Amino acid sequence: MRLSIRIAILLGVSGLYFMSFFHRVAVPGTVSDDVQADFNLSASGVAALGSIYLFVYSGLQPLAGLLADAWGPGRTLLLSGLLLSIGGLLFPQAESVTTLYLTRGLVGVGAAFIYVSMLKEFDELFGERSFPIALGVGIVLGYAGGLFGTLPFERLMAHQGWRQALQMVALGGTAAWVLAMLFMAGAGRLKRRRCERFGGWVGHVLRNRDYLALTASCSVTYAIGFLLQATIGKKFLQDVCGISSDQAAGFTFAMMLACMTSVFLSSLVAQRTRRRRPFVILAAVMILAASLMLLIGAQFVLSRGYFLGCYILLGAAYSFTVFYATAAKELNPREAAGTAIGLMNAGVYLMVALLTAVSGVVLDAYAEGVTQIGGQRVYPPEAYRAVFALCALMALVSCGCAWSVREGRPSALRA
C-alpha cells in the first residue's frame, strides 16, 4: 500500500479520535457550570455525566480489543463512528436529566471502540518499526480534540451557548467519520475478515504479571490527570483561586498543550529506544509530585502561576500513552495487541470512572461549606484538599506498580 494512502487513513482515523477525546474533555469539564444550572444538578449529578461515559467506555474496552483482533479494526471503526456521531448530535438536544444521561451513554458506546481500533489499524499499516511514531501522531491529533474542548470551546460556548456549540462540533465530527470511512473503503480496509480465535488471547494476557502491574500504574496515572483535565480542574480554579471561566479554561488548555507536546516527544523517543520501564516509572513519579503540589497549593491557596505549573506537570505526566501502549504490546504476542490494549483501557477507564464518581461524592460531603455566587455552587478549599489527598495516595501505589514492571521479553516480541 502506498505511503500516501496510509497517511490519509492515519489522518482520517485520527479525526475520529479527535471527536472521541473532545467529548471526554468538554463534557462535563467545560460545560459543567452551564449544564448544572440548566438541569439543577448537584456535583455528583454533574460528575455522573463523566462517570456514565467512562463506565460504558471502560466496560466495552475488552470487546473492542477482541473485535479489533478477530474481525479487523476498520469494521469496528465504521460502527463506532456512526454511534458517536448520533450520540453527539442528540446530547445537546436533551430536555430532561434522563435523556441527558442516556445520550451521554450513547456517546460513550460510540467512543469506546475508536482508540483500540486505531492502534490495531496503525500496527497493521506501519509495522513494528514505525508503530510508535504513527501512534504518537494519531494521539497528538486526537488530543487536539481535548485541546479544542478547553478554551476554544469555552469561547465558542460564550457566543453560541453550550447546546448550539455542541451541535456544531457534532456535525463536524459526522463529516470526519464519513471522510475516514471513504479513505478506508478505498484502500480495502473495511472488508470482512474470517473470525479466528475470538477471545482466545484473554487468558494469556491476564496471566501476565508485568502487564497487570503496567495496567495498574497506567490506570492511576491517567485517572488523576483526566480528573483535573476533564472534571474538576476548571471548577477548582474558579472556586478556590477566584479565576474567571475563560482564564480557568486557559489553564486546562495549557495542560492539554503540554500533554500533546509530551506525547509527540515521547513517540520520537519510543521509536529510538527499546526501553519502556524508565519512562513508566517517570510518569508515576511525576503524577505523584503533581498531586502533592496541588494538595499543598489548595492548603495555602498559592499563586495562579504555581497552579499553572501544577497543571503543566500533570499534562506532561499523564501523556506517556505511547510508552504504555507499546509496552503492553511488547509484553504480549503481536496477534494479541488489540486484546491487550482493550483490557488495559478497560482498567484505565474503570479507574477514571471510579475516581470521577468518588470526587463528586467527596465534594458533596462538604455541602455545608458550599456558597452560591451568580447562580453557581462554589465548593470550599477543604473539599478539594480531600480529593487531592486521595490522588496522592493513589499515585504512591502507582509508583510501586511501575517499579515492578519489567521490559518486554524477547519471546513476547517474536510471538
Image: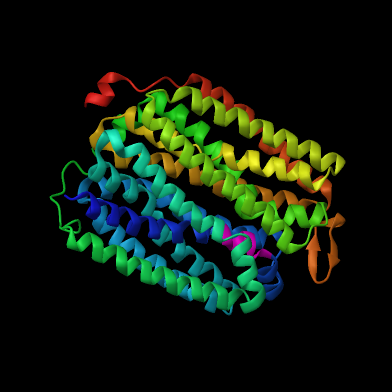
Percent position of residue 195, x then y: 16, 48
Taking the spot 49% from the left edge, 19% from the top edge, the residue there is 404
Percent position of residue 224, x then y: 61, 42
Q: Is residue 16 visible?
A: yes
- Magenta segment, which residues? 25-32
Is 372 one of the magenta-colored residues? no
Look at the picture and state if 104 lies above or below 132: below
Q: Is residue 139 left or right of residue 36?
A: left
Taking the spot 37% from the left edge, 40% from the top edge, the residue there is 133
Q: Quadrant of residue 204?
A: top left
Q: Quadrant of the C terminus?
A: top left
**Which residue is nearer to you in this view: 78 or 340?**
78
**Which residue is nearer to you in this view: 410 or 127?**
127
Look at the picture and state if 79 lies above or below 157: above
Q: Is residue 379 visible?
A: no
Taking the spot 51% from the left edge, 60% from the top edge, the residue there is 22
Q: Is residue 401 left or right of residue 304?
A: left
Picture colour scheme? rainbow
Percent position of residue 206, x then y: 36, 31
Percent position of residue 389, x then y: 73, 37
Look at the picture and state if 217 lies above or below 386: above
Q: Quadrant of residue 109?
A: bottom left
Say how many tags the image has: 0
Look at the picture and state if 369 lies above or below 100: above
Taking the spot 56% from the left edge, 78% from the top edge, the residue there is 164
Is 28 one of the magenta-colored residues? yes
Q: Is residue 150 left or right of residue 324?
A: right
For the stretch drawn in magenta, the main secondary structure is helix
Residue at the extreme left of the image, as rendered:
194
